[in-house]
Image: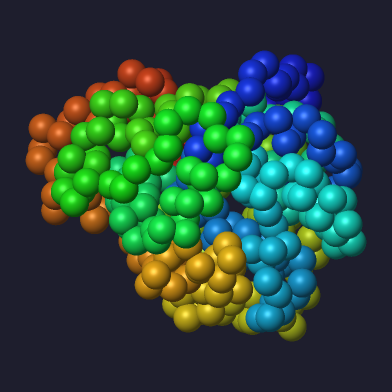
Amino acid sequence: MSETMRLPEKTRELHNHHFDSTIWNDLEFRDDDIVIATYAKAGTTWMQQIVAQLMFDGDPDIAVAEMSPWVDLRVPPKEVKLPLLEAQKHRRFMKTHLPVDAIRFCPKAKYLYIGRDGRDVVWSMYNHHVNANQTWYDALNNTPGRVGPPIEPPPNDIRQYWREWLDRDGHPFWPFWENIRSWWAVRDLPNVKFVHFANLKRDMAREIRAIATFLDIPIKESRWEAILKHCSFEWMKKNATKSVPLGGAFWDAGAEVFINKGVNGRWSDTLTPEEVAAYETRSRTELGDECAHWLATGEDPQG
């Protein structure tokens, strides 16, 4: 780990039915900002909940989705979003699904990157996509400013969804491998911490304490059990309207469908051994052995 590593620079803009990366260009950073970064469906909402519970001592009533906006989502437009962020009085914690070279990187902000096996990502993504309602499609496709094709309903067959996602690199959302690669390249910066979904599942308490240390948030031990309770999948699903955007209005089944199962490995009952091997080969080719191993397992390649 070296503090003399070159800081990442923004080199491009990304636009599609979801993204407007130019919003980052006009954001006025604060030194204590927290940025939660993922490809998507890798535990973003979970991490937002964890950070909120640490910051507010296990408060069950905070509206996390309102407090922690998705900066690069183009809905609402930056003319609406940026003043809301500027008006926040608490320590800000924002989320992004962009690769690191499409955001402005602040050397004093803290960055939490959450990874998850791509197969688990797709199974969670499919649940998110297949349950989206017309309000979701209208917001993404009909709000002025969309660049590129609209997002369409998914196929009924999850295997077809999987094949298209892998063959077309993240279709119909955004490229997968470059997101992982870009953040992996800056993982040794002192203000970047990598967290893996599988490790949160294995030992949430240990991971949350490590996150608190990284963010310089002292834990009030009298509230520790409340923090853990409110970060559990069971509690979050039961109280999903507090952490899901617009209280779940984009899904007819409600906010609970957004907080899905939090279960890994559901793909193993669907994908053939040949499909599994093809994904694993692709992962090593795209990411290199160390990063591919971390993405699949959460294990630190350096021990």
Question: Is the residue 132 above or below the residue 272 in the image?
Answer: below
Tag count: 0
* Rendered image quadrant of residue 101: top right
Relative image position of residue 21 (x, y in whole percent): 65, 32
Residue at 41%, 58% in the rendered image: 134
Residue at 54%, 29% in the rendered image: 147
Quadrant location of the N terminus in the rendered image? top right
Residue at 11%, 32% in the rendered image: 274
Query: Which colour scheme appears in the figure?
Result: rainbow
Q: Residue 134 versus residue 2: which sits nearer the camera?
A: 134
* Left/right of residue 5 with respect to residue 295 in the rendered view: right
Question: Is the residue 184 above or below the residue 27 in the image?
Answer: above
For the question of whether residue 71 can be seen, the reply is yes
Q: Residue 172 versus residue 106: which sits nearer the camera?
A: 172
Q: Residue 267 versus residue 221: which sits nearer the camera?
A: 267
* Left/right of residue 68 with respect to residue 303 in the rendered view: right
For the question of whether residue 117 can be seen, the reply is no
* Left/right of residue 76 with respect to residue 156 in the rendered view: right
Relative image position of residue 184 (x, y in whole percent): 55, 29
Residue at 35%, 27% in the rendered image: 169
Relative image position of residue 94 (x, y in whole percent): 70, 50
* Rendered image quadrant of residue 251: bottom left
Relative image position of residue 28 (x, y in whole percent): 87, 39
